[in-house]
Image (tube, helix red, strand yellow):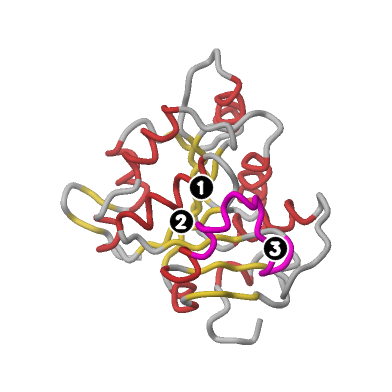
Amino acid sequence: MGDSRYPRFLKEIHKPPKQLHCKGNVDLLKKRCLTIVGTRKATRYGKEVLDMLLQPYLIDLDICIVSGLAEGIDTMGHRRCLELGIPTIAVIAGGIGNIYPLSNAKLYEDISEKGLVMAEYGGKVEMHKGMFPMRNRILAGISETTVVIEADIQSGSLVTANLALEFNRDVYVIPGDIFKSTSRGCHSLIKQGAGIIAGEEDFKQVLGIEGDQIKCF
């Protein structure tokens, strides 16, 4: 935590990680981070939302997209960032050598080469369920803003969002189909006071863009 590269927002949370084990470009930790998370059971709607949010202008804003390397929204978000050249950080549960899910082994390597993979522990450690909420607190704590795209009531994304609210961070959600389970978590967050992103202009306002002007942070 005494390292100058340790993310300043992460220092402010309750019980921040004493160490961060990294593989890749640690300079990304100095950038303004935006956490984007969502369901493992992503729909076409979720992909369309990611395509709308993740645009090349994020590079000019010097924003780094943070997610959890999980299946679904996280995976699609990381891949979209790599395609566009947007900086991305994958925060993984357990040790830096724990690749989960294994189906994302190639994505893990791609992010470590072009972005940053980060974990609370070094090497490989024995995994248990409690490590995922531990990872989620890093996802919530490293950024000033968290955006949730599709989430059920009982999901890791909702845990991340609630932790972000606990840390007094901004939380925004994408509203969805009221008949789909993947919308229930987002709508629950809206009832708790989370902001709504209902289009690209809303997202630009979240980022501080007014028309063609970018506000300073």
Comparing labels 1 and 2, the label whose residue is closer to the camera: 1
Q: Position of residue 2 (x, y in %)?
A: 64, 86
For the C terminus, which image quadrant? bottom left
Relative to 129, 97 lies left or right: left
Q: Position of residue 158 (x, y in %)?
A: 64, 39
Relative to 63, 33 lies left or right: right
Q: In front here: 45 or 195?
A: 45
Q: Specify few, some or many for label 3: CA neighbours under 10 Å numbering under 14, 14-19, or 20 or more.
A: some
Q: Residue furthest toward the top?
A: 179
Q: In front here: 71 or 183?
A: 71
Q: Specify few, some or many for label 1: CA neighbours under 10 Å numbering under 14, 14-19, or 20 or more.
A: many
* Circle number at residue 75: 1
Q: Earlier in the sequence, mark 3 or mark 2?
A: 2
Residue under the image location 41 percent in, 35 percent down: 47
**In the image, is residue 99 part of the stretch drawn in magenta?**
yes
For the N terminus, which image quadrant? bottom right
Q: Residue furthest toward the left?
A: 212
- Separation of residues labelled 1 and 2 (CA atoms): 15 Å
Q: How many marks?
A: 3
Question: Which amino acid type is marked by label 2?
Answer: Leu
* Circle number at residue 34: 2
Tell me the quarter of the picture where residue 11 sits: bottom right
Helix, strand or loop at disc 3? Answer: loop
Question: Which amino acid type is marked by label 3?
Answer: Asn
Q: Specify few, some or many for label 2: CA neighbours under 10 Å numbering under 14, 14-19, or 20 or more.
A: many
Helix, strand or loop at disc 1? Answer: helix
Q: Earlier in the sequence, mark 1 or mark 2?
A: 2
Q: Earlier in the sequence, mark 3 or mark 1?
A: 1
The residue that label 3 is drawn on is 98
Q: Is residue 186 above or below residue 97?
A: above
Q: Which residues are magenta?
A: 94-109
Tell me the quarter of the picture where residue 15 sits: bottom right
